[in-house]
Image: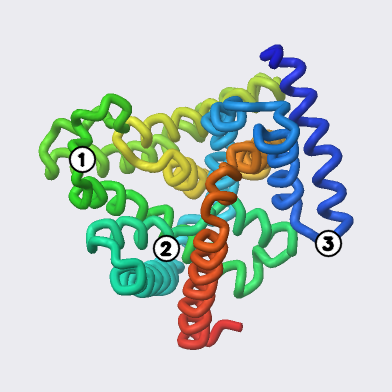
């Protein structure tokens, strides 16, 4: 089909404008509307977009990065430090509990090898931060006990991705170094202790530069009274921090969250939120639309029973683990 950029934009925006209001009218989340829009225009229904649905994900994922930056702006460092036990307690209980149950189930019922079972269990124990937080925001639950508990679990999962990604190669039977498209960071070739020092150095740099460099720089930019320049500076901040974290093999979204926490006490907090929020909303919608367009329905048609049963079991396991944790912590 015609790869003209304007035509592609018309297709994406038209699908979103039609499907999202319908989903909201039916009492569903806007996320469902975006997913349905992606499915409709995707290669398995109308075929308006093909490989572009997957290619655009690399760009649209930046909406998730912006979302975590905005969440960080709303969470002052003092409050974040007070939540450390809450995050570690709920988050670790959910991740370990879900992984253990899934691991045993895959090992005994699916008859998979233990390495395969553990790798799959670690991946499935994680959840989509973008989907959950967006849903909580739409339902007005972000500042409730349930919202804070959900955020604690999701934040721990984002942090846990780092050691999980470092551990997964040990479970692989394939030589990842021989794979040309294997993701590599600039510190991959260094020893483990040196990599740790570099990562800690990057994190410390983000913290101190936010306190002593970025805030004075924003003061200078604010004096120009050019709104577009301040918006560009806010985007540069998020992109720069995310890229720095990606260079050392860490999550760009986690880096953006840290930058947001550092700037949460600055006087520019609300202005940064106002400048970035529109980009975040648009890119998040594009992200969900891309997810819908990239769903492989051929795979679902080939294995419908396995996929739906496995999905139901996974949902039940996660619900059971979170229910037990909430009862223990007396959350309702």
Q: How is the image coloured?
A: rainbow
Can the viewer see residue 120? yes
Query: How far is mark 1 from mark 2, CA to CA?
Result: 23 Å
Q: Which residue lies under the disc numbered 2?
A: 125
Left or right, 203 with reference to 268: left
Q: Quadrant of residue 229?
A: top right
Q: Is residue 115 above or below residue 185?
A: below
Left or right, 166 with reference to 226: left
Tag 2 secondary structure = loop
Query: How far is mark 1 from mark 3, CA to CA?
Result: 46 Å
**Counting residues from the N terminus, which is met first, the one under dot 1 or under dot 2?**
2
Badge 1 local density, few (<14 within 10 Å), some, or many (20+)? few
**Counting residues from the N terminus, which is met first, the one under dot 1 or under dot 3?**
3
- Nearer the observer: mark 1 or 2; the answer is 1
Q: Residue at x 40, y 71 (%)?
A: 98
Query: How far is mark 2 from mark 3, CA to CA?
Result: 28 Å
Tag 1 secondary structure = loop
Q: Residue at x 58, y 26 (%)?
A: 51
Q: Which residue lies under the disc numbered 1?
A: 174
Q: Which residue lies under the disc numbered 3?
A: 27
- Nearer the observer, 48 or 54: 48
């Amino acid at each position: 089909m015609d790869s003209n950029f304007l035509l592609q934009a018309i297709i994406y925006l038209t699908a979103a404008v039609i499907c999202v209001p319908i989903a909201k009218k039916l009492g569903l989340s806007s996320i469902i509307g975006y997913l349905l829009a992606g499915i409709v225009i995707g290669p398995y229904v109308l075929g308006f977009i093909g490989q572009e649905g997957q290619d655009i994900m690399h760009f649209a994922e930046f909406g998730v990065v912006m979302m975590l930056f905005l969440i960080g702006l709303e969470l002052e460092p003092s409050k974040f430090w007070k939540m450390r036990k809450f995050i570690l307690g709920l988050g670790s209980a959910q991740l370990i509990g879900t992984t253990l149950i899934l691991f045993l189930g895959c090992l005994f019922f699916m008859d998979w090898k233990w390495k395969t079972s553990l790798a799959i269990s670690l991946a499935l124990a994680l959840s989509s931060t973008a989907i959950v937080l967006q849903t909580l925001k739409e339902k007005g639950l972000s500042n409730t006990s349930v919202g804070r508990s959900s955020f604690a679990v999701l934040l721990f999962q984002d942090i846990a991705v780092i050691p999980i990604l470092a551990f997964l190669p040990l479970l692989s039977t394939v030589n990842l170094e021989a794979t040309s498209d294997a993701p590599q960071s600039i510190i991959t070739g260094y020893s483990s202790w040196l990599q740790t020092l570099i990562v800690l150095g990057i994190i410390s740099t983000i913290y101190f530069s936010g306190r002593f460099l970025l805030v004075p720089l924003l003061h200078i930019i604010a004096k120009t009274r050019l709104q577009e320049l301040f918006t560009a500076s806010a985007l540069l901040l998020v992109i720069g921090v995310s890229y720095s974290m990606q260079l050392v093999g860490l999550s760009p979204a986690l880096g953006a969250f840290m930058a947001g926490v550092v700037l949460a006490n600055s006087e520019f907090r609300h202005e940064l939120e106002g400048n970035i929020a529109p980009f975040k909303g648009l890119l998040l919608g594009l992200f969900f639309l891309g997810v819908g367009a990239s769903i492989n329905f051929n795979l679902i048609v080939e294995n419908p029973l396995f996929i739906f049963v496995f999905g139901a079991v996974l949902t039940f396991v996660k619900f059971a683990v979170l229910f037990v944790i909430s009862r223990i912590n007396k959350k309702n």
